[in-house]
Image (spheres, helix red, strand yellow):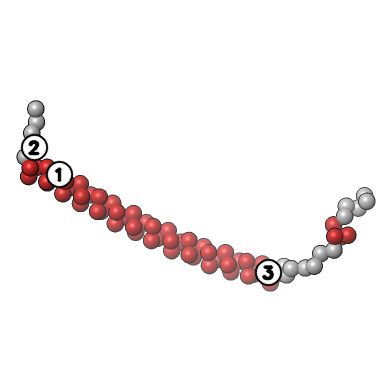
Amino acid sequence: METHTVQDRINELEAKLSFAEDLIDELNRAVYRQQEQIDLLQQQMQLLHQQLQTVMPVEERDLRDEIPPHY
């Protein structure tokens, strides 16, 4: 039966904690980069929407124009 001293267990826990902290830091950086990308995409989408509105302004439609020709 293998027994660990208290110091061995503390060292193992410290190593695991260090790994977990590194992983959390890496995940935080990934989330930060993703949020930057989301913000940029939202700005681009807003710009495209504005451009689309200038190219194709909202027109009042007459329902008679939408009736198929066979009526």
Q: Give the residue pinned by disc 1.
A: 12
Quadrant of residue 1 within the rendered picture: top left
The answer for how far apart the CA atoms under marks 2 and 3 are is 70 Å
Q: Check contact, mark 2 vs mark 1: CB within 8 A.
A: yes
Q: Residue at x 85, y 57 (%)?
A: 66
Q: Residue at the spot x=81%, y=64% of the render?
A: 61
Gap in angstroms between the C-alphas marked 2 and 1: 10 Å
Q: Give coordinates of residue 47: x percent, y percent.
A: 58, 69
Per the image, label 3 sits on a secondary structure element best described as: helix
Name the residue: 68% across, 72% down.
Answer: 54
Kindly identify which residue carries mark 3: 53
Residue 57 in percent (x, y) is at: 73, 70
Closer to the eye: label 1 or 3: 1
Q: Residues within 10 Å of mark 2 (few under 14, many from 20)?
A: few
Residue 35 as seen in the image, left or right of residue 60: left
Amino acid on which disc 1 is placed: Glu
**Residue tagged 2:** 4
From the viewer's perspective, tell me whether residue 28 is left or right of residue 44: left
